[in-house]
Amino acid sequence: MIAEAGLAALWLAAAMALLQFIGGLTLLRSGAGQLIPLIKPAAYMQGALCAFAFFALMWLFYVTDLSVLLVASNSHIDKPMIFKLAGTWGNHEGSMLLWVAVLSASGAAIALLEKRVEAKTLYATLAVQAFIALGFFAFLLFASNPFERLVPAPLEGAGLNPLLQDVGLAFHPPTLYIGYVGLSVAFSFALGALLTNQVGPAFARAMRPWVLAAWIFLTIGIAAGSYWAYYELGWGGWWFWDPVENASLLPWLAATALLHSVSVLATRNALRAWTIMLALVAFAMSMAGTFLVRSGILTSVHAFAVDPERGAFILALMLMYTGLAFVIFALRIGTVKQGEPFQLISREGGIVANNIFLSVILAVVLIGTLYPLAAEAMGDKISVGPPYFNKATVPIMVLLMLALLIGPMLRWRRDDIMRIKYWLIGAAAILLCSGIAVWKLAPDIGIFPLLGIALSLALAVAAWLPLRGRKLLRTPLPVFGMVIAHFGIAVSVFGMAAESGFSKETLTALAPGESAEVSGWKVTLGDIKPVVGDNWVAVEGEMVAGKNGDTFVLRPQSRQFFKPEMQTSEAALLTRWNGQLYAVIAQPDQEGDGRWQVRLWWKPFVTFIWYGGVLIALGGTISLFGRMFRRAKKPAINKWERA
Amino acid sequence: MKPKHQRLLLALIAVVALVAAGLIAASALREEASYFYTPTTLAAANVAPGKAIRLGGMVQKGSIVRAADGVSITFIVQDQSGTQMVAYRGITPDLFVEGSGVVADGRLRPDRIFVAESLLAKHDENYVPKELADIDMNAAEHTKDTLSQ
């Protein structure tokens, strides 16, 4: 009953999207406005119906209704409740339903909250949003029905991939999806503004909070996903350049560039065409990511089903929307007037540098991600892995960091490089001193970790300089946001560089009582105990780790899941302020001699990678609040100043 | 600078940057893209030692030899008509057993032994390394099919 109601809600929501689209279209085509009063309510209804459908599916997972195919294929009666609920989006159909629900919710949010753009632009934006939704409704209803029944119902269900049975999973996909799909708002706004000739600072100011919000969620989602891969896969790495990771990185790169260029458009009325272009590219990357992850052309824990028909469907949708968007862009961009000019040495110049480097990284990552697919279509089996991505992107990231040392210090429109000569000298001094110090400390760490540490130290100072000479109480919140986000980048890059340059690894086989050493830590294997969980059994190795008189206990597990059958390693992490000790234990081999394979890492400052990510998202959040409550805040601060 | 010229200049910079991206990608791909081989195609191809490649096939029965250190192994990967010796140091992935499918990332040593840096094994019935789907006769079926039978 609930399943049928959910399906009916989806059909109704699709009808609402159609109404919303037609309403906007008639307004644009002929200026006829009979349907205008219906557009906003249609957007609300569409959002509400999709939310209902999503919660209906969640309910089915909650009660483990095994007569629904999706529940039977992905859940199990013995699974812990939190993973039953998270299982709602831990599969193809459910995650596509979440995708569409977020898309509809974004449309409803625009209709409800956006008051700054002209009415006609708003309706055009909503029409575009509905047009995107229609395609994905078709995909859900015709190719990925989450509410399909299964007759006869099985007795217990097939279970969920154990790698996905983790608390991280409960939050990672929804966060990422809000970011991913939230970029659809930028896309719709860009097209809406193009179609109604409203490309200018007012439109940019309206679009900026939406881009910012989506970007914050993307940032959190990527950081969380990276930490999940780090502790759950047990491989010790935090970024694998897996195509699925790239699928989330690509929209993030585009959104980061967009975030900066939209500021130029809002503040200085320049970079109009470029900003529109980036808004289109950002959501195109979201759709490309969805295609990569959901089409089953990749091997990964994220690729739930191998079904070429679905892949072709998403590919067709993606090509249609991206193609149409760029046709509209090409046809209408002539009407967008040239923006205000600026000189090369200026804040705008710095942001152009940011945009160019980010775009080059985006292009390089995109090529590396798609190349194996293109090669396979021509009969070659090729894989492109970390060596390619590191070699091709890290040097550009170095340039990006260099630009970041200078750009935020420059004034809008035109500036004189001599004005900041003391900072340039200071930055060069920090780079040189820290570079030499690291090189003396560890002559063989490699050029990029060394550069990374030097650049992050310089940036850790540079990030705060835009606050110099400002009255802190009168400084707008977005400036604080920028400063904190840029400082977060310094923190994150420091963690990455320290981890890649100074990690120590020990791989050995230990019998209980024996010890191994890694980077000054003495780790002794104690008892090996069996442990029983809800739907798994494990062997747990107790390890005592000691350094400088302190001792800690680590308990890594090797788990055996029943449904589906699978082994996973539960790494044990010991977090210190200056790094993490990471321990993995493996099942003994069949002809074992009483020893257990043990893998230990000491990863200096690895946690900084995610602390930095949190700071970046925090900076974005502060900036977002500053933009939203700007008018309300201003008088209050002034009053306080006077008092 | 006239406004018109500024737009042209920016467009030009963007084009140059994209061409640069293409060149960077092409050169890095030439050096770092690793081709997939089976033991048979690897024997026929003239792959230089040290070049990153992927090797896929089945682990030959009775071929896994564990070294005294407890963490190094050698084994033979085979396909229909060829074999390749592989050396690996590390924790073997879940379900890495004799007779199972495996994909190894690594490089050939000058003595033609393949040194694997990572191993990817068949995880469960839903997850098979893509390259193996063609080789493995018991290729995975989607849960949907197995359930509804």
Image (spheres, coloured by chain):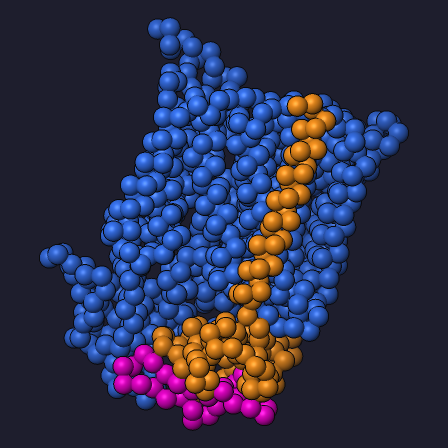
Q: Quadrant of residue A509?
A: bottom left
Q: List x then y, in percent, for residue A482.
A: 45, 31
Residue at the image position 53 percent from the left and 75 percent from the top:
B54
Residue at the image position 48 percent from the left and 62 percent from the top:
A387
> Looking at this view, is A472 or B105 the one in front?
B105
Q: Is residue A97 visible?
A: no
Q: Is residue A246 above or below residue B95?
A: above
> Looking at this view, is A373 or A182 the one in front?
A373
Q: Is residue B70 above or below residue A166?
A: below
> Looking at this view, is A640 or A350 the one in front?
A350
Q: List x then y, in percent, for residue A126.
A: 72, 35
Q: List x then y, in percent, for residue B8.
A: 70, 33
Magenta residue check for A314: no
Q: Which chain is orange?
A: B
Q: Which chain is blue?
A: A
Q: In the orientation shown, which residue stands out farthest toward the left?
A: A549
Q: Is residue A604 visible?
A: yes
Q: In the orientation shown, which residue stands out farthest toward the right?
A: A30
Q: Is residue A176 above or below residue B83?
A: above
Question: How many numbered tags mark residues here?
Answer: 0
User: What residue range appears in magenta?
Assistant: B57-84
Q: Quadrant of residue A597?
A: bottom left
Q: List x then y, in percent, for residue A472.
A: 37, 19
Q: In the orientation shown, which residue stands out farthest toward the top?
A: A642
Magenta residue check for B71: yes
Quadrant placement of the C terminus of chain B: bottom right
